[in-house]
Amino acid sequence: MTETEKQAALGPDAASAAPTPRRRRRALRLTKRDRVLLIVLLGIPLLADLAFVWFPAVTSVVLSFTSWNGVGAIQPWVGTQEYKFAFTVDPQFWPAVLHNIIWVLVFGLIATPLGMLFAVILDRNLKGSRIYQSVFFLPVMLSLALIGIIWELMYSQNYGLINTLLGRTGSDAINWIGNPDLNLWAVLVAASWRQVGYVMILYLAGLKGVDASLREAAQIDGANPWQTFWRVIFPVLKPINIVIIVITVIESLRAYDIIYIMSHGTVLPGLELLSMLVTQYIIGQTTRIGYGSALATVLLVIALVPIIIFLVQSFRKDEKA
């Protein structure tokens, strides 16, 4: 039976829906200019990704098995010695891990729900809603370094706004950054100031895309606003939730700029973070490239967990679609 007879047997719909080999060849046929353009558009980002992301990452993993100090040839090969030193000897390692965990928890349990709350409120088209959105989103447009400078001035022991408002001046002034019991929480307040606006704008974008008929159907069924959000709207925002979880974890692990500014580049007690330790050992005064690379590898492994979860969720969604 020829191809034409087969299509005739299946009917006109099947004949029109099934792509013929000629159509397929026509769709895949690219001119020389198209191929060059395709290579340029794909090749440049791919090379940039390999050069600036994967090459440094793989190099860090390799260097983590050496005790190279940055001078001369890369030697000697010490295996997992640097990792054992981090896990069992370095007094700053586990406090840094704990502080990173606290950072993730504060962002996940305080900043994210607060940003979601602001998004839900602003989604109700309140009077002056755009002004409120601009006010909350303004910190997101500022770099973490600039936010660090702003909050350093507010936390200043001698002339800071917060000590002035609390009436703590002179010898009674609170040293917000120098006190190891307070400095992490003080920096987290400053970082959350920006993170709340970031989460708010993501949730607000997601809420604007929710089908209005879902809310109307919930109201017809007698659901109150609380039930409508948690049982109807929130499940629809699942893709946004996944993105925010990944962003929250990554932002927590790569926190560096704001602490570097507020601690003037030194790893203060109470402000140890893995990113600060990596910088201290790779480009600081005590240069230990091998040990700094081992810490960077630990940080890379921790950061890959949410990324892998995100990719698995995305692939499952594509397969279902």
Image: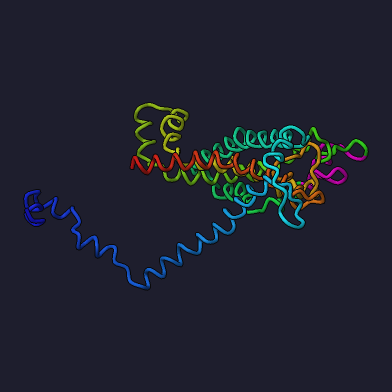
Quadrant housing residue 269:
top right
Left or right of residue 284, residue 296 in this image: left
Q: Which residue is nearer to you in this view: 151 or 50?
A: 50
**Residue 231 seen by the camera:** yes
**Residue 188 seen by the camera:** no
**In this view, which residue lies farthest toward the bottom?**
33
In the image, which residues are magenta?
152-170
* Vertical order, 40 against 62 (above or below): below
Residue 139 in the image: state x and y as whole percent.
65, 49
Residue 303 in the image: state x and y as whole percent.
59, 42
Give me the residue at 6% from left, 54% from top. Answer: 5
Residue 62 in the image: state x and y as whole percent.
63, 48
Q: Which residue is nearer to you in this view: 164 or 290?
A: 290
> Is residue 162 a member of the stretch shown in magenta?
yes
Give me the residue at 19% from left, 63% from top. Answer: 22
Q: Which residue is nearer to you in this view: 245 or 228?
A: 245
Residue 311 in the image: state x and y as whole percent.
47, 43
Left or right of residue 276, residue 119 in this image: left
Left or right of residue 23, residue 320 in this image: right
Q: Which quadrant is the C terminus positioned in? A: top left
Number of marks drawn: 0
Give me the residue at 54% from left, 50% from top. Answer: 130
> Is residue 144 a member of the stretch shown in magenta?
no
**In this view, which residue lies farthest toward the right?**
171
